[in-house]
Image (tube, grey):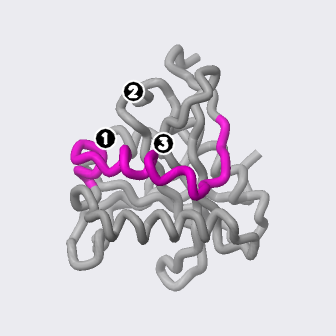
Amino acid sequence: MDTNASSVRLEPWSEEDFDLLRAMNAPDLMEHLGGPESDEALSERHRRYVDLSADRTGAGRMFRIVSLPEQIPAGSTGFWKQTWDGEPVYETGWTVLPAFQGRGVATAATRAVAALARAERTYRFLHAFPSRDNGPSNAVCRKAGFELRGERDLEYPPGRPMRCNDWRLDLEELG
């Protein structure tokens, strides 16, 4: 049993979550994602998160992660439509604030978001693409039951090459 295991609740991303997004825009949290975003880019991201959270068309959802029992926002996670190798899939990602890292929050949130993506019954696979150098995020994928499919080159943010690991979870096999 993981003694660091944490309980989380996922709540739909809302207008009130901009300060959380700003806190997650810290240099150490954005190290593997091209660095902190500008205020304008952050505002655009917040709008996308709010819009995605309100969408019920199967395009995906965004959430604030609330750590329990503290009832404190700990980060964000979500899933969204993506085309990967010519196939429609869901992609997922997460950010957890430093005070909650190393406690199983990201793994618990990733398992919870996978269950929600499965419940959509839209796509068979959920992918995650952490930088190959991001040890903690790759560990989350492994602990959450994703299968490592190998290294791939992506552009993220647009125009910036990134070497990532392609992790895949079969939503039809999720229990």
Q: Mark 1 or 3 closer to N-term?
A: 3
Dividing the image into 4 quarters, which one contains the C terminus? top right
- Mark identifier at residue 99: 2
Asked which secondary structure carries label 3, the reply is strand
Q: Which region shows up in magenta?
A: 9-32
Residue at image mark 3: 75
Splitting the image into 4 quarters, where does residue 110 fall? top right
Asked if marks 2 and 3 touch (Cβ < 8 Å), the reply is no
Q: Is residue 22 magenta?
A: yes
The residue closer to the viewer here, 101 or 138, is 101
The residue closer to the viewer here, 157 or 174, is 157
Side of 33 relative to 120 (left or right): left
Residue 71 location, x and y as percent? Answer: 62, 27
Side of 58 relative to 63 (left or right): right
Q: CA distance from mark 2 to mark 3?
A: 10 Å
Q: Residue at x 40, y 60 (%)?
A: 129
Residue at image mark 1: 135
- Which residue type carries mark 3? Gly
Asked which secondary structure carries label 1, the reply is helix
Q: Is residue 89 magenta?
A: no
Q: CA distance from mark 2 to mark 1?
A: 18 Å
The residue closer to the viewer here, 20 or 104, is 20
Residue 88 location, x and y as percent? Answer: 60, 79
